[in-house]
Structure formats: structure tokens, C-alpha cells
Amino acid sequence: MLGNVPVLHWYGDQFEIPKGAVRLAKTELCPNQAFSVDNHILALQFHMEADPAVIESWLIGHCAELSNAGIDIPKLREDAKRLRQELPAAGKAACIAWLEQNHL
């Protein structure tokens, strides 16, 4: 649904998807990034809704966590500026598509 639009995530948490769930997204570091269960549950381990206008407060509020995870905060800030229109639009479109596909 998101195509090649990058999403915001810096989580180190790992989890297994529930039995019967369908994996929707993965990365090399985190094999379970999103899943759905039937047409009732959509679970995400990243922020496809991240409005770059709000990300700055996240960077400030989580600077220790981001630094400990080896995240390049200036690069993340620059990526947010670069994707300020594309990311929120893609996130909204992906949510709408999931809801429409599941007749909700």
C-alpha cells in the first residue's frame, strides 16, 4: 500500500505475529513490522501517519532513545523535511485502502 515511501521507525522491539495473522510489512532488522487479523485488526510497528511538522517534538522527546539506537537525528530531520508531503499522503492512502478493502 505504501509502495516505496519510507516510514518512520526506530523501534528495537521484536514480536511474533499472532497465529492466523497476515504479515503486511517487514524490514531486514525487524521481520514483523505490520500485520492484520481478518478484517478487524491492523497492527503497525512504525509510523506511517507521521506528520513531519510533528516529528521535531518526537526527536526532542526521544533524543536519548534515538541516540542509543544509533539513529542519525539530523538525517531523520532532513528526511522528514524531504518527505513532508509524500509521507502523510501515503499513510492516509494506505489506511483508507485497508479500510475499503475490509469493507469498514
Image (cartoon, rainbow, N blue to C red):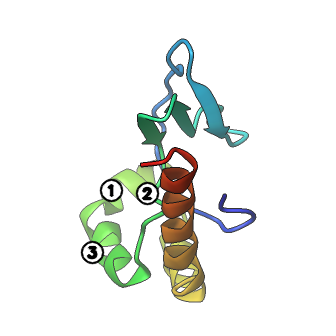
- Mark drawn on residue 18: none
Three-letter code, disc 3: Ser
In the shown orientation, is residue 35 left or right of residue 66?
A: right
Task: Give neighbour class at mark 2: few <14, some 14-19, many 20+ (Cα, 10 Å).
Answer: few
Circle 3 or circle 1, nearest the eye: 3
Circle 2 or circle 3, nearest the eye: 3
Q: CA distance from mark 2 to mark 3?
A: 15 Å
Quadrant in the rendering for residue 49: bottom left
Which residue position is annotated with label 3?
Answer: 57
Task: Give neighbour class at mark 3: few <14, some 14-19, many 20+ (Cα, 10 Å).
Answer: few
Find residue 60 and report its horizontal and vertical position in percent: 28, 71
- Mark drawn on residue 67: 2
Quadrant in the rendering for residue 78: bottom right
Which residue position is annotated with label 1?
Answer: 64
- Quadrant in which the N terminus appears: bottom right
Find residue 73 and report its horizontal and vertical position in percent: 48, 70
Circle 1/circle 2 CB separation < 8 Å: yes
User: Which secondary structure lies at badge 2?
Assistant: helix
Q: Is residue 74 visible?
A: no
**Along the polypeptide, which appears first: circle 2 or circle 3?**
3
Quadrant in the rendering for residue 13: top left
